[in-house]
Image (cartoon, helix red, strand yellow):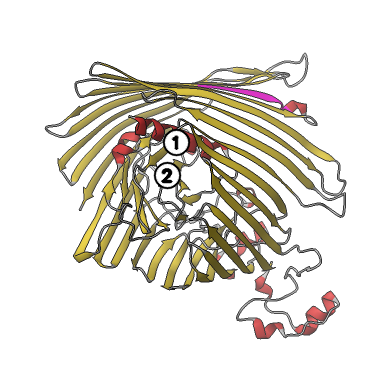
Amino acid sequence: MRLRIVQGVSLLMGLVWVGSSPAAAQAVDGPWRIHSPTPDTLVQDGSLFVVVTLQAGKRLDPASVRLYLDGQELTRQAKVSDTSVRLLYARRLGAGRHTLHIEGQEAGGSSLPALQWSFRVAGAAEDAAVATAPRPARRFDFTGSTILDTRTSDFSGRRDLRQEPLRTYVLQAEAEGRYGAFTFPVRLYLTTDEDPRAQPRNRFLVGVRSEHLTLLLGDNTPLYNPLMLDGARTRGIRAELYLHPVRLAGVHGQLRRGIEPERLPGAISGPAAFTRTLTALRLGVGSERSVLWHLDVARARDDAGSLPEDLAEATGLTPMENLVAGSSLSLRLLQGRLYFEGGGALSLTTEDVARGVATRARIDSLFDTHIPVDPADLAWLFTFNTTTVPLRPDRLSSLAWYLRGRVAAGGHTFTAEVRQVGEAYVAFGNPFLLSDRRSLTLTDRFKLLGDRLSGTLRYQHYGTPRRDDPTRASLNADLFYGQVALAPWRRPTWFFASLRLHNRSTTREGTGDPASDTRVRSFSVGGYHLARSGDYQHGLSLSYTYTDRRDVLLPALDNVTRVITAGLNETFPFPLYFNMQLNHLLVTSGDQGTLRKLTTLSGLIGYRLRRPELDVSAGVQNTHTAETELFLTPGGEPLVLPGSDRIGLLLRGVYRLRRDMELELQLGYDTYRGEAEYTDRYVVLRHRYTF
C-alpha cells in the first residue's frame, strides 16, 4: 500500500511539473509528447519514471491504452488519464538499452499512432541485485502488434469546421525480432490522411541493434548535442558504432521546413514546405559513467526545387543552408551523484543557396576584406555567397554554449544551467531553439519524510543578452515555479499545491521604448482520495486553479482565470464501472466583464464480462459556452458573444476473440450548436492483433 502511495505522489508531481514548466524537455512524435525518459536519454540509477502526454486539444481514451516495457505489459501498474500516461516502475532496471511501447486512441474514437522509443541505463550490468534485461534469445523470436483502423463519418453543416477527412484508414505495426545478441525493430504507420502541406504522417522504421552496432532505416529522432540536433524527425539512415571507449554515430535523411500559415497566399493543394536534407556526424570518446567527450557536425540544406516557383515567389522564401559544429564534455563522480556538463557550437547560415557559390573577388569587394580560400573549393561542404551571414568573433553572434551541473544529496537533487544563444546562431536540426537568448535556471527536486513529501522548486531568468544599442528590441523575464505533494496516510490519498510567478517585459525595435510589461500570478490546489466500502471502491479528485494576468502598459489585456475540476470514479463488485468529470472555466476582465464562461460535464458507464471477454461502455459529454457581453468602451453598448453547446455521444464495444486478438466497434455522434452548426455521425472499426 505504501508503494502505491509513493507511486501516486511521484506520478502526480511529475505530471504537474511537466505540464507547468516551460523549460521541460520533451520529444515530439506525432500527437505524443515524451517528457520522461526522452528517446536515447541516459538514466543514471536505473529508476524509471514514464511521463507521456498528448498535444493540446486532444483527449485520450484511458481504456484503450496499452503500455509495454521490453515487451512486458505494465498497463495495470500505470496511471492513465485522458491527457497522460504515467508509470513509476517499482524495480530498478539493469544497464543497457530498454524499449517502451504505448498504443491507444482518442476519446472521440480517432486512432493514435503507436509510440515506441528506447532509452539507456548506466551502471554495472553484472549487478545481481538489479533487474536485468532479458537474456539473448537462442533462436529467432518475433513479437509485436498490429492495428487496423477505419473511421467513416457522415457530416452535415459547416464542413470547414472539421479538418479531418470523412473517411480514414490507418495501419499500424510495431514489432521486434530477437536473435542472439541482435534485436530487429520494425515500425509502420500508414494512413490515407496524408497532407503535403504538413509533416509526413506516414512513417516507417526498420533496423538492427546490438551491443556494438545500431543501424536504422526510416523515420527516427536523433538526439546529439542539445544545441544542434535535438529530436527533429528525420527520414533516412541512422548508424552507431561503439567500440569502447570510442562511439561513432551518423544520420543522413530528409525533413521538412514548414511555412508559417500567415505567409501562404491562400488555399493551396500542393507542397507547402521545402524538403531539407540533413547530414550529421558525432564522435564520442570515453564512458557515460565517468568522462565523456563529444564532437558533432551537422549540415542541412533546402532543396531549391522542392517548393513550386509560384509559391516561393508569393511567400518570398528562399532555400537556405546551415552548417553547425560543436563539442561537449560531461563528467560524473560519486556514482552519478555529482554531474557536470558543458558544450558549445558555432553555426554558418546562407539565406539563399539558389544564387550559387560566389567568387573570392566578389566576396572581397562586398565585405571589404580578404579571405584566404576560394569559396568554390569548399562548395562540397558549404555554399558561400553574398547571403551568407558573416561570422563576428568580436560579438560571438554565431556562437551558442551551455554549462550544466547536478548534485544529489539528502533527498534533494539540485540542478543549475546557464545557456546563451547568439542572435545569428541557427541550427536546422533544432528548429525550436530560440536565437538571441540568455538564460539561468536553478532547480531543486526533493523527496522527504520517507517520500511522503515531494516537490519541485524552480527559478529561471531568461531574455536577450545585454545590448550595446539601447534602441534595439529586448526581452527580460523572471519565472518562479514551485509545487509540493503530500501523502499523509497509508491509504491512496494525496494533496498537492503549486505556485507560479512570471514577470516578462519587452521593448520596441528602433526606439527602445517599453512594449509590454506582463505579470502572471497563478496557484493550484487539489487532491485525490481513494476509499473502499466493502467491495465498492470510490475515487474522488478535486482541484482549483486561479490565474491573474496583468499588463502594466496594456491594462485592457488584464484578465483573471478560474478553473474548477472535479472527478468521481466508482467500481462495483459486479462488472460495472462508472466515472464522471466536471470542469468549469471562467475568464473575467475588470473593464470588459466576463470574457468566457465554459462548463464541461462528461460521464461514462461500462460493463465488463469475462466470458465472453466483452467490454461495453456508453459515454456522453456536453460542453456549454455561456453567452457573454463585452464592454469595449466604458459606458458603451456591450458586444454580445453568443453561447454554444457541443454534445458528444459514444457507444463502444471491445470483444476479445482470442488472447492475442480483439475487435472494437464505436458508434459516435457529435453535434455543435451555436453561431455556426454542424453534426458528425461516425463509425470506427478497429482490429488489434498481438503476436
Residue drawn at x 31%, y 61% as measured from the top left: 186
Residue type (three-letter) at the residue carrying disc 1: Ser
Q: Is residue 577 left or right of residue 583?
A: left
Q: Nearer the viewer, residue 367 or 20?
A: 20
Q: Which residue is denoted by mark 1 in the rendering?
A: 10
- Label 2: few (<14), some (14–19) or many (≥20) C-alpha neighbours in 10 Å: some
Residue found 64% across the figure and 81% down from its top: 379
Q: Tell me: 272 left or right of 465.
A: left
Taking 431 as reference, is 617 above or below it?
above
The one nearer the camera, 520 or 301, is: 520
Judge left or right: residue 154 versus residue 364: left
Specify the principal SS of the magenta part: strand
Between 237 and 192, the residue placed more toward the observer is 237
Q: Position of residue 399 (x, y in %)?
A: 70, 64
* x then y, percent, for residue 482: 60, 33
State yes or no: discs 1 and 2 in contact (Cβ < 8 Å): yes
Q: Which residue is mark 2?
A: 49
The span picked out in magenta is 557-564
Quadrant for residue 237, please give it: bottom left
Q: Please indicate, yes or no, whether residue 570 appears anywhere in the rendered image.
A: yes
